[in-house]
Image: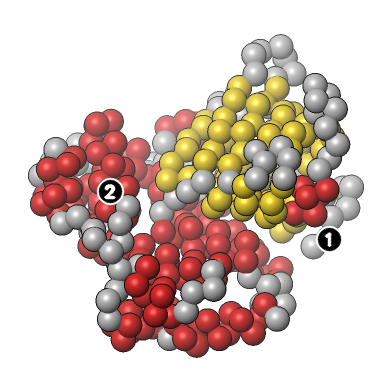
Amino acid sequence: MGLTDQNKLFSFKPCCSTGTDCDDGFQGGHQEICIRPGLWMSMINFFSDTPVCLEYEKKYPVIDFGFVISGGIKKQTVCSSGCGPKQMRVKDGNSGVRMENRQTGIFTIPAEAKQQILHLHMTLPFFRSLVKPGDTVLPLEMQAILKGASQAEFVDIRPMTPDIQTVVYQLLNTSSNAFPWPLYLEGKSLELLCLHLAALGLDHCQSPQGQLLSLDEKQNILKARDLLVADLQSPPSIETLSKMTCMTPAKLQAGFRQAYGKSVFDYFREYRMQKAMQLLDETRTNVSQTAWQVGYTNVSHFSEAFKKRFGILPKQYLKNRSGSIQ
């Protein structure tokens, strides 16, 4: 899976306007992997004391799926035909997809922030080999791309679901010695793509009456989701969420099922488990501290829930995790 000039997607150089050298932290913390012809993964995982500003060029036109765990990235794409520049900024906790006919641009990464960012890049022929035009759950702009509209452009940014966050954490933090690495990367890449496309289905969700959700209803569901996970130790009740979002409990539950495939309670339970795994992966908290941070007052109940979800007790998971890092 090593990169050669033939299968490398990106080339970088310092921004002309700043004269900034290609930051050593970026070079050491950026990895590009060609998983198979037409599919690449790039990972940014580093801390920089100074801002990074680089010009980039893609060898092929691709559709990009980006996932920001921490930090943030701002991109400005350049159009070779003379049209104006476009800017896009993705903050931590969000994911985005972008398809546009621009292969060059500039990206900046702010200083003094831990950057954990993952991208999937795929050519249109590869994307079309996986997803068919008949998948009507997708946004209309993406359906047009699948049907061959070569000039179609599409940009979407949204909060990551717990399932997506879990896969991104695994890809950014798992040791390459833990699995058959090429097979692991390909499987996780396809899983991540599937989960993100499912999340895009929010734009085609239907209300309890069988109609497409309005923009206000979709925004209310997103607001309810943010309120639900803001305080894991004292989450709001369904009734409180309903009042805060001006939706009936029935409509709120239906909206969650259509947007996330889960009831409000199931979404919250899954989010807590994914957060617990993140804490065990990235911090030095023990099982008791992790249980408290995700809202469990009884460690035994937390351990039982963790094992039911992941098939392993958190104590054993932490032990295995520590062993793989050493």
Query: Residue at the location (59% across, 59% down)?
Result: 189
Label at residue 2? 1
> Which quadrant would residue 63 be assigned to in this image?
top right
**What amino acid is at disc 1?**
Gly
The answer to whether residue 218 is left or right of residue 12 is left
| CB under 8 Å between discs 2 and 1 | no
Classify mark 2: helix, strand or loop.
helix
Circle 1 SS class: loop
- How many residues crowd mark 1 within 10 Å: few (<14), some (14–19), many (20+)? few
Q: Quadrant of the C terminus?
A: bottom right
Its colouring scheme is: secondary structure
| Count of numbered labels shown in the rendering | 2
Residue 29 in the image, given as x and y percentages of width and height: 75, 54
* Residue at left offset 34%, top offset 72%: 292
Q: Amino acid at mark 2?
A: Leu
Q: In terms of depth relative to the viewer, which is nearer, 325 or 247?
A: 325
Q: Which residue is mark 2?
A: 227
Residue at x 72% of width, y 45% of height? 49
Residue 303: x percent and y percent? 36, 83
Residue at image position (17%, 41%) is 244
Q: Position of residue 194 (x, y in %)?
A: 49, 55
Q: Position of residue 312 (x, y in %)?
A: 45, 85
Q: Which numbered mark, 2 or 1, is in the foreground of this view?
A: 2
